[in-house]
Image: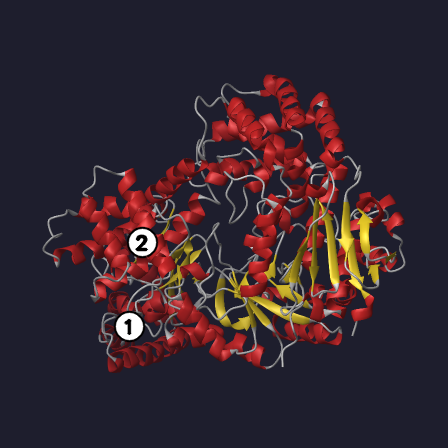
Amino acid sequence: MPHSVLSTYRIQLHAGFDFDAAARIADYLADLGVSHVYCSPYLQAAPGSTHGYDVVDHGRVNAELGGEKAHQWFCRTLVENGLGQVLDVVPNHMAISGPENRWWWDVLENGPSSRYASYFDVDWHYSQEEGDNRILLPILGDHYGRIVEARQLRLERSGGAFVLRYFDHVLPVDPRSLAPIISKAEQRRGSPDLGFVASALDYLPLPTATDRASTRRRHRDKEVLRVQLGRLLDEQPMVRRAVDEEIEAVNADADRMDALLSRQNYRLAFWRVARSDLAYRRFFDINDLVGLRAEDEDVFQDTHELIIEWLAGGVIDGLRIDHPDGLRDPQEYFLRLRNAAPQAWIVVEKILHPGERLPASWPVQGTTGYDFLINACRLLIYAPHQQAFDDYYHSFIGAEEPVDYQQLLQQKKDLVVAELLGSDMNRLSSLATEIFLHHRRFRDFTRDEIYDALAVLVASFAVYRSYVRSADAAPDEQDVRIIDEAVATAQQRRPDVDPELFGFLGAILKLEHPGRAERELATRVQQLTGPVMAKGAEDTAFYCYTRFAALNEVGGDPGSFGLALEEFHAEMQRRVEHHPRAMLATSTHDTKRSEDVRARLCVLSEIPEAWAGFCDTLREHAAAYRSGAFPDPETEYLLYQTVVGAWPIDVARVSAYTEKAIREAKRFTTWTNQNQEYENAIRSFVERLLADERARGDIEQMVQSIDEAGKLNSLSLALIKLTAPGVPDIYQGNELWDYSLVDPDNRRPVDFDTRRKLLQQERSMAPEEALRRSAEGIPKLLLTARALRLRRRRPDVLGPGASYIPLHARGAKAGHVVAYIRGECVLTVAVRFPLLLAADWGDTSLEVPEGRWTDVLSGAAVEPGVQPLHTLLRAFPVALLEKLDEQA
């Protein structure tokens, strides 16, 4: 029986923090109070991977983390310390950058006849310039002809095995394509044995022969011939010399190299060609991550065999499923996974937009918590000041008209479709064009018209995707609404397009046309709208619309502002009813900024005038460091928020963050088309601004004015996460103050030695001492550890069966109080808007229910009845009360 997942602690494994290093902190994590260590993916990843999401082999653990032996010791150490384990799993894609991925290597070597051809989401019949059945590999640094003529591609041999090498890229060679080379070598040497090998290679079944007998014979015979050729070359030096001379002749002759390449099961191309001509589904726009067909039973079995074995053996208790929106049929996948692991705790990285609900048909515990993260953040933002921030933002950036975030997002999604996902769109439009030809009312629409309409439609979805299943007779109500709204939006955006065209596409997506091709189109559209939204919002618009950066977070709406307390309570009660074991997150490896940066920035919502004055002054100081029109006002405004949120921060970190931000924004520079003049101007601006003593003084003064309030926000945020309905996750290092930015900044080494020492001190520390040592982060550590231990001690009152009852404060400052009871035995009192509160509770009070209560954080006894807030929070800025007489 698996351990119940009560709380998790996320660790990022890589060569610099491997299984041994993780095992060494197991006792610390147990003392902290978590129930489970939550590991980043650790199946074998691409060489040098720093994150693990680029898996190349699902059958073994990552050697760079220590391999199987170190993994076993890590798992044993967790058990010895009473800890369970949750593993991050990547079912959607694999890395294909080298021979380490033997499945993909086999596909490149053998084409459609590969035993693994069906494992990858490759459209073998997508028309390319060279015909079908060849996979485009856009890995070249220049046009193909120039690369070949520059002799940058080389044929190499090791024994009887041949590869093609292009700098760091190594590719297999179709064995049949070697026949002319071996034959010419035989002519040089007159070796009958070599002649036999050449003839046998030429006689291998074609890579397009996919019947079972042909594929078995091809795979058997090519291996026999490889061994035979290797032995021959080993034993006969003159024959070996003839073959090697022929290899060098090919390498020296562009025509012969071109001829050899034309016989491969892949076509090498300039990397920019990927924008329009790829025949395989990727993870977003990353060419080195190919989509897996997880819907195939063999693929599921081969990619999950080790994971299911660990679940069955109690090595791991739960899974975090990465990017479910990329899967062809997420529901089918989750049903299969649940059948294989009935007791597992499963959460999914599903990004929900406001009002969107996780499909009830998915047999999972819930999401990974971005929906909670956004609601908790908005709870700390002072809604009445929204207009002031709108006005100042528009003034700062010089906008003639107010910027509407949704309109901006729409523009960025259109940009992503046009600039990053053109190859996906080409495959969609090819399939759609074939479908239209079989419907007389629509057969006269041209391919260009169909492409245009599809491009508008996939960018018009208000959420990541719908979940229409081709196996179902009809979609559910939520999916119908999502599709209908997308069609209506597309028609509104493009009134020049025949509305029947959008209507027909919408009907296909809703399965109103039952053909096989129609259902295939519906499925592929759903797999594409997620990347369009993710790249358009998180990776573009979030860096272009910078009115209030704390809201620019995964799953968030930067155009929103504060959240009413009643709405937050209602959302928590929905969690109790529907997903009481979903994850609760405030910082993750994917968040744009850490929880403490966000908490500090939320304080700014309370002081719009002071913030505007600070920005105006800083802008005056920075004027001398500008380079013409650079930096643009959006980038400058984001920079000011970033340095205030993450201060103290060194120039190198700010420069690295700003470089990423401007490339993601895609306004003046991008990752693939860098504008060095612009980037140099921004880098110089950052360096000179942060070297200016006046500017640094202004920044430090602003941070000093909000720092304590920001820390109080952090404590409130942490307490709510640790007591709200669900399973709280602590991102590595965030038990202390952590002012990190987007990755890779949030993956810097964590000082666990310091945390271990502080935790030992916390055991006997009074809250007053913790507050005196606030600079060390001890208040957050004290709160985190004591709340986690309470969860571990009282799983009944904070677990899935526990109720959530809002409590309402009374008095002038009642709106500053967030209070609720869990399971009738645990009472949370958190605070918001601390600057406006000014530590003056006045007559504000809270009624504590009957019973004998103690504050877990301070140890103080608390009487039932009406209690003034200044009494409840005398010892510590927030309170966590436990009802003792109900303790089991």
In the image, is residue 843 above or below residue 288?
Answer: above
In the image, is residue 499 above or below residue 103?
Answer: above
- Residue type at mark 2 is Leu
- Residue type at mark 1 is Ser
Local SS, label 1: helix
Q: Nearer the viewer, mark 1 or mark 2?
A: 2
Q: Is residue 244 left or right of residue 695?
A: left
In this view of the protein, which residue sits in the foreground, 730 or 193?
A: 730
Q: Which residue is mark 1?
A: 113
Image point (56%, 51%), residue name? 590
Residue 246 position, x and y percent, is: 31, 62
Local SS, label 2: loop
Q: Is residue 481 left or right of residue 872?
A: left
Alpha carbons under labels 1 and 2: distance apart = 20 Å
In the image, is residue 305 above or below residue 100?
Answer: below
Quadrant of the rendered structure where residue 510 is? bottom left
Q: Earlier in the sequence, mark 1 or mark 2?
A: 1
Task: For the N terminus, give its image quadrant.
Answer: bottom right
Quadrant of the rendered structure where residue 575 is? bottom right
Task: For the C terminus, give its image quadrant.
Answer: bottom right
Query: Counting other residues with Cα less than 10 Å from the Cα at mark 2, is it few (<14), some (14-19), or many (20 or more)?
Result: many
Image point (59%, 18%), residue name? 623
**Label annotation for residue 278:** 2
